[in-house]
Amino acid sequence: MQSSTNANTASPSRPVKVHALQQLIPWWQDIDPAVYAELQLPSLRETALSPVDVAVIGGGVAGLSAALALNERDATLRVLVLEQAEMLGCGATGRNAGIFTPGINMAMSEIDPASPALDFYPATTALFHDFIDEGQKDGTLLSVRKTGALNMATSKRAAYKLERETQLRVESGLRAELWTPAQVNEATRGRLDTKPVVSAMWLPDEGRIQPLTLLAYLARRARKDYNVQIVGQARVTGYEAVKGQGRAAYWQVTLAGGLAMQARALVNCVGPTVAANARIYALAFKADFPADFPLFWDASPYTYADYRPGNGRLGVSGGRYGKAGMTKNDNAYYQRLADATRRWVPELRGTGPTHRWAVDLYVTADLIPAMRVVEEVVPGVAIEGLGAHGVLPGIVLARQAADYLVGQLSK
């Protein structure tokens, strides 16, 4: 995974030297020392690799959620999280555009009516509301705000799709409204160019979560409440189910440097950066929007981009995907994304982005997150399909994985 950027200098108040990657992405500059401290990890080399009940591969949102959920169901389990980076947040979550949207990276109208993936929409909406409640508590690390979101159609075809999408969401018990351009203009205080808008879908229950605070919140709960061990610089190179004769079956987990460990069960949730096939681009502009300004995006197929106002800037990601690992066309993609942003937000015309970066992910047109059982005799699962809007679904799947593994281990 590679990044391309206009690097900014790290804040002089940073308590620990910031990795060069973190200077590229503005969300790292929003966190306070308590959040940053929670992202730190002891090195695998400092850890005694005794056998554990569950090894969790990957310290992203899904991995931390799985570890937490396992001990919520059985506090006696010894759980070890293996993160290949030296600290939390260096993977897809720390590089994203700061937009965690309920649902998945597909419209409900694009999903087979019989697909269980439709359940992600109400489940992740409820999860987002839980995080809003958590964010109101004293001493929480979690930074979350409900702002609502606008999906704006700029063609009759896109408007028809929005009408259908609104209907499906309402029928599913979710809140959604079809709005006129005048309503959009009023809700955005006239700061967006709504002249091209034909109609819009208003989603009052959406908003934004500062991604690094979510990682810190999950890590603190896992460590403090259940003594989950989370280690860094722990790159897993392979794992094998050992079903030996006359002894309990176990997973043999091999790590870089020739180290190995054993676990009774395994959760593999390394995230969407493995086998990446596409590059997603992101920009940030300096822009002072009210704290409750809604998220917004264009409903047009293939050209949409997601916009996240907040913290003195406007973040944007999306547009057409580039090819993973390629850099020769990056500037053209950044330019298209910047031009689209300036069309939507007239006050940004004549200005350039303060940050630009990219993340290589595995994405497909029908990328639906799922939990897959990789072994039954030795309990093991993989949480897959987390590219694009897979953060909140990853938490839902992590809880399902915990239910399954605890059930298997108790047999």
Image (tube, rainbow, N blue to C red):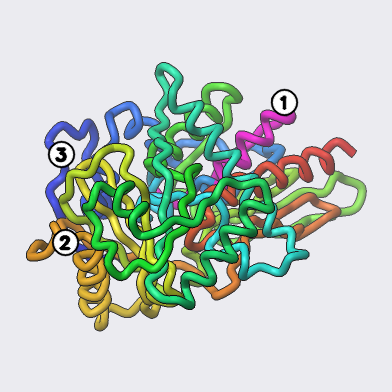
Identify which residue, 46 or 268, lies in the foreground.
268
Label ID, residue 346: 2
Precedes in sequence: disc 3 or disc 2: 3
Between the residue at mark 3 and the residue at mark 2, the CA separation in whole angstroms equals 30 Å
Tell which tag, 3 or 2, sits nearer the viewer.
2
Instruction: Pinpoint residue 164: horizontal percent, then vertical percent.
Output: 59, 66
Between the residue at mark 1 and the residue at mark 3, the CA separation in whole angstroms equals 41 Å
Identify which residue, 383 or 99, lies in the foreground.
99
Instruction: Pinpoint residue 221: horizontal percent, then vertical percent.
Output: 53, 27
Between the residue at mark 1 and the residue at mark 2, the CA separation in whole angstroms equals 57 Å
**Residue 57 seen by the camera:** yes
Residue visible at 45% across and 67% down in the picture: 361
The residue wearing badge 1 is 76
Where 371 sits versus 114, above or below? above
Q: Are marks 1 and 2 in contact (CB under 8 Å)?
A: no
The residue wearing badge 3 is 11
Precedes in sequence: disc 1 or disc 2: 1
The quarter of the displayed image where residue 109 is located: bottom right
Where 313 sits versus 354, above or below? above
Residue 250 located within the stretch drawn in magenta = no
